[in-house]
Structures are given as structure tokens and as C-alpha cells.
């Protein structure tokens, strides 16, 4: 459980804030409907690593010299409410029965209730900002939600034709994954230093980490899993990831045809999927993706170097390195 140790180390300078945040986050979900309270209680008790609120608090404390305020707590709660809403809806869309090792909301309460719970969490997040007139924070979050939806739809549109270029791939992962981490970081800065240049600097910082994070996820598909074989899940789902895109772009006409045919028609054939994985490795797809991931990581660290040394900056640096060194 080495990665949990790293997460605890990252959390150390904001431990008190994270404990108070959990209380406030739970309160922000409350409703007069008993069924809703039962479901939100279930959601709160199966929380993950809480990376998003950690980004909010670490950035806020780094740019302000160690201070947070009520806006920081509200910003962290709003981002977590809206992120949770998107996860609940994602599980319905993907017909997924598990999330983080627990049953998903739709598995326990069926799709109709899951969709309504997602809508409820989204509205609670928006109202938390509106009721406190945090319109600057609300704008950051609303842009992130719009981009996440666009990114998902762009990926669906392109997956049908398997014609994703490297540029389109970066746009998809920027919107789908990086935009939410970018929102967390710009929110943290905006909560303590509204309208400052740090807000944009931290947005860019979060975006770079998000890009590196997603490429790392892509690489997991090609590395040995718990059963000793690469999973190939992305190939089975016809997802065009960076290692595959690179290999396609550097393949002969014949190999390209075989590769596209494999992903389109034989993506459920285990033997063929393993052949595609072997081909991508042989063509240097993994090495190329890793180099790109490291360049995003270095750019993120460079942005951090503009800030004075502090325990919060140390934790953010640790977070950047954790993103690309994590094992799951």
C-alpha cells in the first residue's frame, strides 16, 4: 500500500482542512427526503482518495501563504458535488455495477433514481455557489462541466470512425480529464486571490497534470495487470489512446489496415487483442506515450517553480510525481 502512504504524505499539510471539509461536504448534500439522505450517506462513506479537494486546498494555501477561507471550502464542496454527479451519471451511461470496489448507485437503486440523484447533486453544487454569490467560482466549474460533456461526445464521434489524430486525442483528454483538475487548481487560487494572475497559472498547472494523468491511464492498458497480462480494455472498447494512435501513424499501409480491422471487428477476440498490444509495443507506442507524459509533468513542475518554497508546494510537487508513478 505504498501509494496510500504517498497520498497521506501529500495530505499532511492540509489534514485539518480536509477533516473540516468532509463535515461541510456531508452537510452540503443534506435533503428533507429520507431516500436521498440514505443514498448520499452511502456516497460519502465510499469516498476515494479525494484528489480534487486536495488540489483545491493545497493550491489555495500555496498561493496565499498558508490561508484558506469559507470560499475555499465551498469551492472544494462544489467541485466534489459536481464531480460525484458526473460519476453517478457515468455509471448509468456505462451500465456499470461497481465503482471503487463498491456497488454503484444504479446497481443498488436502479437507473431512474441514479439519474435523479445525479441531477440533485449537480443542482446542490450550483446552488451552493449562487446562494453565497461565488459567481467567479461557479463560472470555473460550469466551464469544466461543459467541456467534460463535449470531450465525451467528441470521443464517441471519433471512435465510430477510428480517425483520431494526435491533436484530436489531446483535445479529448484535455476536455474529458484535464479540465476538472484544472478547475480544482484555478478554484483554489480564485477562492483566496480572485482576479489574480495565479488563477490562470494554476488552471494551466492543473491541465498539465490532467493530461499526464490520462496518458498514464492509457499506458495501464498495455502493462501487465494483476493476472500477469495486459488488460487491453481500451482496445475492447474501441478507444483510441496515444500508444495506439502513434503506432497507427507509424505503420505500413498493410499493418494499418490490419490494426483498424482488429480494433473494429476483432476487439472481443482475446488472442487478437494481445497481438495488437504486442504490435503497439514493438512500434514504440508505449515509449512515445511515456515521453509525452513526462513532458507534461516537467511543464507542470516548471509552473510550480515560480512560487516560493512551502510545505504546500512540496505536496503539489509530490502530487505531480505521484500522478505518473502510480501503479493503478
Image (cartoon, helix red, strand yellow):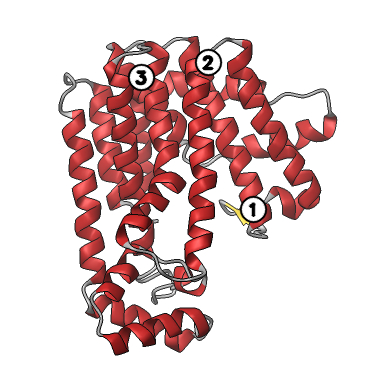
What secondary structure is marked by label 2? helix
Residue 5 spot, x, y in % from top left: 35, 41
Name the residue located 29 percent from the left edge and 41 percent from the top edge.
208
Mark 2 vs mark 3: in front: 2
- Compared across the picture, whether 54 is left or right of 84 comes to left
Q: Reply above or below: 185 against 237.
A: above
Name the residue located 64 percent from the left edge and 53 percent from the top edge.
91
- Compared across the picture, whether 109 is left or right of 150 comes to right
CB within 8 Å, label 2 to label 3: no
Residue in front for this viewpoint, 306 or 62: 306
Around disc 1, counting alpha carbons within 10 Å, would you say few (fewer than 14), some (14 to 19), or many (20 or more)? many
C-alpha separation, residue under disc 3 versus residue under disc 1: 31 Å
Residue 112 spot, x, y in % from top left: 80, 48
Q: From the image, tell me which residue sits under label 2.
A: 135
* Residue 233 visible within the image: yes
The first of marks 2 and 1 along the sequence is: 1
* Residue 45 visible within the image: no
Residue 72 spot, x, y in % from top left: 46, 16
Q: From the image, tell me which residue sits under label 3.
A: 189
C-alpha separation, residue under disc 2 versus residue under disc 1: 30 Å
CB within 8 Å, label 3 to label 1: no
Q: Reply above or below: 264 against 206.
A: below
Residue in front for this viewpoint, 6 or 86: 86
The first of marks 3 and 1 along the sequence is: 1
Q: From the image, tell me which residue sits under label 1.
A: 91
What secondary structure is marked by label 1? helix
Around disc 2, counting alpha carbons within 10 Å, would you say few (fewer than 14), some (14 to 19), or many (20 or more)? few
Q: Reply above or below: 171 against 82.
A: below
Amino acid at each position: 500500500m505504498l501509494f496510500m502512504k504517498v497520498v497521506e504524505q501529500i495530505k499532511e499539510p492540509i489534514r485539518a482542512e480536509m477533516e473540516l471539509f468532509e463535515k461541510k461536504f456531508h452537510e452540503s448534500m443534506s435533503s428533507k427526503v429520507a431516500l436521498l439522505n440514505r443514498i448520499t450517506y452511502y456516497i460519502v462513506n465510499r469516498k476515494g482518495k479525494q484528489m480534487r479537494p486536495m488540489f483545491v486546498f493545497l493550491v489555495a494555501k500555496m498561493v496565499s501563504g498558508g490561508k484558506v477561507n469559507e470560499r475555499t471550502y465551498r469551492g472544494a464542496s462544489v467541485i466534489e458535488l459536481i464531480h460525484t454527479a458526473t460519476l453517478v451519471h457515468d455509471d448509468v451511461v456505462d451500465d456499470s455495477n461497481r465503482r471503487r470496489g463498491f456497488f454503484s448507485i444504479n446497481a443498488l437503486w436502479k437507473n431512474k433514481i441514479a439519474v435523479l440523484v445525479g441531477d440533485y447533486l449537480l443542482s446542490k453544487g450550483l446552488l451552493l455557489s449562487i446562494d453565497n454569490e461565488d459567481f467567479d467560482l461557479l463560472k470555473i466549474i460550469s466551464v469544466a462541466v461543459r467541456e467534460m460533456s463535449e470531450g465525451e461526445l467528441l470521443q464517441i464521434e471519433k471512435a465510430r470512425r477510428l480517425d483520431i489524430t494526435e491533436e484530436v486525442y489531446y483535445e479529448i483528454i484535455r476536455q474529458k480529464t484535464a479540465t476538472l483538475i484544472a478547475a480544482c487548481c484555478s478554484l483554489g487560487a480564485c477562492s483566496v486571490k480572485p482576479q489574480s494572475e495565479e488563477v490562470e497559472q494554476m488552471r494551466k498547472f492543473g491541465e498539465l497534470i490532467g493530461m499526464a494523468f490520462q496518458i498514464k491511464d492509457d499506458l495501464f492498458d498495455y502493462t501487465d495487470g494483476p493476472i500477469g497480462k495486459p488488460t487491453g480494455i481500451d482496445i475492447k472498447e474501441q478507444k483510441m489512446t496515444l500508444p495506439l494512435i502513434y503506432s497507427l501513424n507509424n505503420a505500413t499501409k498493410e499493418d494499418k489496415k490490419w490494426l483498424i480491422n482488429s480494433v473494429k471487428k476483432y476487439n472481443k477476440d482475446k488472442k487478437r487483442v494481445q497481438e495488437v498490444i504486442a504490435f503497439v509495443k514493438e512500434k514504440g507506442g508505449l515509449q512515445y506515450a511515456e515521453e509525452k507524459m513526462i513532458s507534461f509533468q516537467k511543464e507542470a513542475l516548471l509552473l510550480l517553480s515560480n512560487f516560493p518554497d512551502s510545505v504546500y508546494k512540496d505536496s503539489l510537487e509530490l502530487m505531480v510525481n505521484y500522478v505518473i508513478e502510480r501503479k493503478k
